[in-house]
Amino acid sequence: MKTFEYVAPNSLAEAVSLLESAGPLAHPLAGGTDILPQMRYFRVHPTLVVDVKRIPELRRLGFAGDGLHIGAAVSLADIAAHPDVTRLYPAIAYSCGLVGSVQIRNRATLGGNLCNAAPSADTVPGLICLGARAVVTGPAGTREIPVEEFNIGPGETVLGTGELLVKVVVPPPPNRNAVSYLRFTPRQEMDIAVVGVASMITANDDGLVSHVRIVMAAVGPTHLRAHRAESVLEGQRPTAELINRVAEEAAGECRPISDVRASAEYRRHLVTVLTRRTLGACAAAQDIKV
Ligand SMILES: Cc1cc2nc3c(=O)[nH]c(=O)nc-3n(C[C@H](O)[C@H](O)[C@H](O)COP(=O)(O)OP(=O)(O)OC[C@H]3O[C@@H](n4cnc5c(N)ncnc54)[C@H](O)[C@@H]3O)c2cc1C
């Protein structure tokens, strides 16, 4: 690992000013579970590391009028155990509780999972399904970006020089709404998703799907929405037959690569299976007969 300077500011303004002054060679540090291995194996070479864990705005977690506010430096363990999260957003609690191991989740943060921009990140598909927004502060002030648009490629985000993710805001879940996330990993724990899929269904009183989202992980350069598959289900009753068709459609929309962990063909197959299972789980959660 190359030598670097470490600072741990207590305020957002100080962090932004430090990041701006050092430019692209300054990197934020949250739990360090992604960036420290990257530094150790010379994949990134920051000259300045700005620890964001002492900044109060990044440490807050709770439900406000416009939804759940998750500070970027809140640990995944704290999110998974928070009563507002487990009650109102069980899919977020579940995906945070999947990451790594107990030790990793005690260090790792939601902000780090999003900003690392890995297409396999487990917390991101559920956030996209729920229409979450990323709140970012930088030298030019504060702006909001849909989480869906935050990552633009592997390891690449929309953040500009000096910008910091402050929090993620998840809107209140609508009535008759269910979200489900499933991933495939060869091991039960301490493994990265070969493929992950999150589905969300909102149903009307007649049991028809009024809103649907399907988000796929690890089958493209970023998390991908299956737009065509969603439109097949919109306005329909989610029967088993239709769900099978939607799952096939989703598999046609993903853009997997073959690598040491799986072939593109196997990943496509996994998209079909996980889409079918997550949509089935959403329908079952709302007691819609499929
Ligand atoms: C053994 C092991 C198992 C793992 N298992 C999983 C898994 O199952 N699923 C999964 O999705 N991931 C997994 N990971 C990856 C990692 O733990 C997660 O991505 C984690 O959420 C990263 O959070 P962090 O706080 O440690 O990020 P850090 O390593 O601190 O930061 C990650 C990146 O985000 C940037 N960053 C951090 N905070 C901010 C901010 N507020 N604003 C702007 N940029 C910021 C950093 O500069 C860095 O580029 C695993 C990692 C390990 C080592």
Image (cartoon, helix red, strand yellow):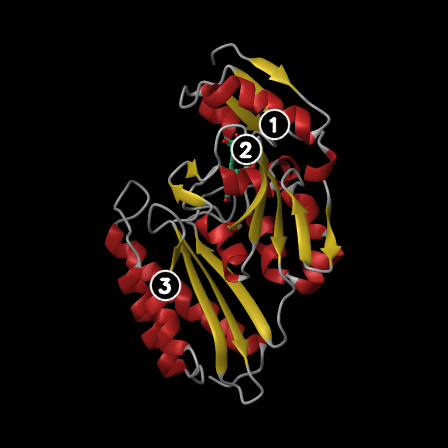
Q: Which mark is residue 163?
A: 2
Give the alpha-carbon distance from disc 2 to disc 1, as whole Å.
6 Å
| Image vertical order of residue 285 relative to residue 190, above or below | below
Q: Are marks 2 and 1 in contact (CB under 8 Å)?
A: yes
Q: Secondary structure at mark 2?
A: loop
Label 1: element kind: helix
**Measured Cα–Cα span from mark 3 to mark 2:** 30 Å
Report the amino acid beneath label 1.
Answer: Val
Query: If you read the primary sequence from the N terminus, does the residue marked by circle 2 or circle 1 appear first?
Result: 1
Q: Amino acid at mark 2?
A: Glu
Sequence-wise, which precedes: disc 3 or disc 2?
Answer: 2
Quarter assignment of residue 73 = top right
**Residue type for callout 3:** Ala
The reply to whether residue 273 is in sight is: yes
Horizontal and vertical percent position of residue 269: 30, 61
Picture coordinates of residue 138, whole percent (x, y): 57, 33
- At which x and y percent is residue 33? 55, 32
The residue positioned 61% from the left and 23% from the top of the image is 17
Q: Give the residue furthest to the top.
A: 3
Ligand 1 closer than 8 Å to label 2 CB: yes
Q: Is mark 1 within 8 Å of ligand 1?
A: no
Q: Residue at x 45, y 25 (%)?
A: 38
Say whether residue 233 is left or right of residue 208: left
Q: Which mark is residue 16?
A: 1
Helix, strand or loop under label 3: loop
Left or right: where 139 falls relative to 251 = right
Q: Residue 65: x percent and y percent?
A: 73, 60
Residue located beneath label 3 in the image: 226
Q: Relative to residue 190, is residue 96 drawn left or right?
A: right
